[in-house]
Image (cartoon, rainbow, N blue to C red):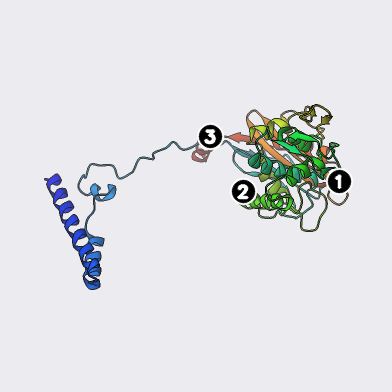
Amino acid sequence: MARHGRKKRTTLRESLLLFTKKAFSLRKRPAFIALGLILLFLPGNGYYQDLSLIPDQSSLRPIPFELPPVSPYPVPIEGIAKPAISARAGAVVDVGSAVVLYTKNPTQQLFPASTTKIMTALVVLKAYPLDQVITVKQADRAIGQTMNLVPGERMTVENLLYGLLLESGNDAAFALAENYPGGYYAFVDQMNALAREIHLENTRFRNVSGVEQNGHYTTVLDLARLASVAMKDTTFAKIVGTKTAVVTDVDAQRVHPLENKNELLGEVEGIRGVKTGWTELAGECLVTDTIRDGKEIIAVVLGSANRFGDSERLIEWAYSAHTWKTLDELLSEGEGQ
C-alpha cells in the first residue's frame, strides 16, 4: 500500500513538472509560480520524509565515516610552578589537543629571525620536486649565515633544503626563491598566502631568510602553529632532525659540510628539531618539537638571552607539570565528583 502511494506521488510529480516546463515555455508566469509553490510543498521521498511512512526506522542517520580518536588531554599537576625565562615571548603547545600549556606575551609581534625558514621550507616543498636542479644566480650576495653557494652552482632542491634548515643558509633561501615561478617576490607572496591558509593571524613575511626588515614579524603562538604543520611533512621532519650532513652540487665539484644549529638535538630527550634564529634586534630565537611517550609538544622562544636554556626549562616543565588523560578517564573522574 505504501509502495502504491509512493508510485502515485511520483507520477503526480512528473506530471506537474511537465506542466511547469510547458507553462514556462509559454511565458505564463502566474502558472509557473503557482506550480512552483505546489511542488515546494509536495511530499518528497527523502530519508526524513520516509520516517513518517516507516515508524520503526531509526531517527538517527548513520555517519558514513569513522570519527578520529580524541587525543589525550594535558591536565596540570598542582603545585608545580611555571618556569621563569629570559625570552621576551614564549609558548608551549600540546600538538595532539592543541592546548596551550604556557605563554608569555603570546601575541606580541616580534622579529622571527631565521625561524622564518620554516615557512620558506614549506613553500619550497609545495613548489618543487626534491630532485629538481636549481641554478644559483645571485644568491651568493645574501648577507648573514650562508652555506657558501657560488654563482652558477647547480644543486638539487633537497640539498638546498638541508643547507636552509641545518646550516640556516640565507643563500640557500635566496636561491630557492629566485628560481620560483614569478621570482623572489612571488615566492614571498606565497609565504604570506600560506600563512593566511593555516590561520597565522599575527604573521607577515617580507623576505625568505628572516633578516631584519620593517613589517616582517610573527608571534610565538603563530610559530608554534606553523611548526606543528611543518612537522607533519615527513621530508621536513627528517631534515630538521638531522645533526650533520654533507651535500654536493650535481656536478660533484663543490662540497658543503652542514651542521644543525640546534644544540638541544640529541641532548634533550625526545627533541626532533625544529629551527634556530638570531639577529641583533630579534635576539636568540628557537622553535623545538619534542615527543615523549607519544605526547608531542612544541616550545617557542623569541627575543631570548639564552634560547637553549629557556627552551629546555619549558620542555622539562611541560612534561613534569602535566599528566595526559584520555576522554574516558576525564569522564569517569567527572562522574566521581
First in residue order: circle 3 vs circle 2: 2
Kindly report the distance in space between the C-alpha atoms of the residues bearing marks 3 and 1: 58 Å
Task: Give the numbered dot on residue 198.
Answer: 2
Tag of residue 130: none
User: How many residues crowd mark 3 within 10 Å: few (<14), some (14–19), many (20+)?
Assistant: few
> In terms of depth relative to the viewer, which is nearer, 170 or 250?
250
Q: What residue sits 73% from the left and 39% below the top? A: 80
Residue at image point 69% right, 55% down: 202
* Mark 3 or 1, closer to the camera: 1
Image location (x, y in percent) of residue 162 = 76, 33
- Residue 26 visible in the current orientation: yes
> Which label was assigned to residue 329?
3
- The image position of residue 206, as x and y in percent, is 75, 54
Residue occupying image coordinates x 18% and y 52%: 10
The amino acid beneath tag 3 is: Glu
Secondary structure at badge 2 equals loop
Per the image, the residue denoted by label 1 is 141
Number of marks in the image?
Answer: 3
Q: Nearer the viewer, residue 318 or 96?
A: 96
| Residue 94 at least partly seen | no
In space, the residues marked 3 and 2 are separated at their CA atoms by 32 Å
